[in-house]
Amino acid sequence: MLRSRRILSFSGRIQNYLLLLYLFFFIAFFFCGFFSVQESFVAFLLDICTFLAWTTVLFGISIIICAAVVLWQDRVFPFASILGAVWKIAAVFLCSFAVQFINQIISDGIVISG
């Protein structure tokens, strides 16, 4: 019982580190617009951001499933773990939206049709 709650708490920390790693590469991708870098490096950063985003989202879903198992076993609702996982998933979605928006502007520009 206590073991599964400890695993859930440790998993939340791992998701924190994944989010920090994602934010590092997000900032690196953002600063590519200010410096002269090769297009292959930008594509590499985009691939890393995509991989880390999917990893963070899937890990967050596994935390939510683990929280459901804790609820079923211990009859204790781990609200903080679920809320933290959902918040981190939302943060990754917002950052990945920003990455795709920046990539769209860099590669294709802004098209206004009327």
Image (spheres, helix red, strand yellow):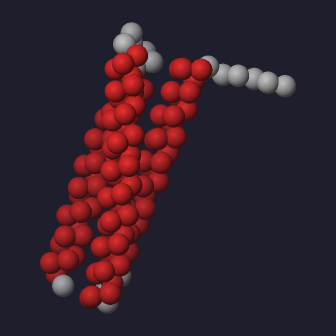
* Screen quadrant of the N terminus: bottom left
Which residue is outermost to the left? 3
When the figure is inspected, residue 94 is found, relative to residue 112, above or below; the finding is below
* Residue 47 located left or right of residue 2: right
Residue in the image at 36% along x and 19% along y: 40
Q: How many marks?
A: 0
Residue in the image at 38% along x and 49% along y: 54
Can residue 84 be seen in the rendering of this structure?
A: no
When the figure is inspected, residue 101 is found, relative to residue 83, above or below; the finding is above
In the rendered image, residue 107, in percent from the top left (x then y), is placed at 54, 20
User: Which of 76/69 is in front?
Assistant: 69
In the rendered image, residue 67, in percent from the top left (x then y), is placed at 32, 75
In the rendered image, residue 23, in percent from the top left (x then y), is placed at 35, 39
Residue in the image at 34% along x and 20% along y: 41
Which residue is outermost to the top? 36
Residue in the image at 33% along x and 50% along y: 55
Which residue is outermost to the right? 114
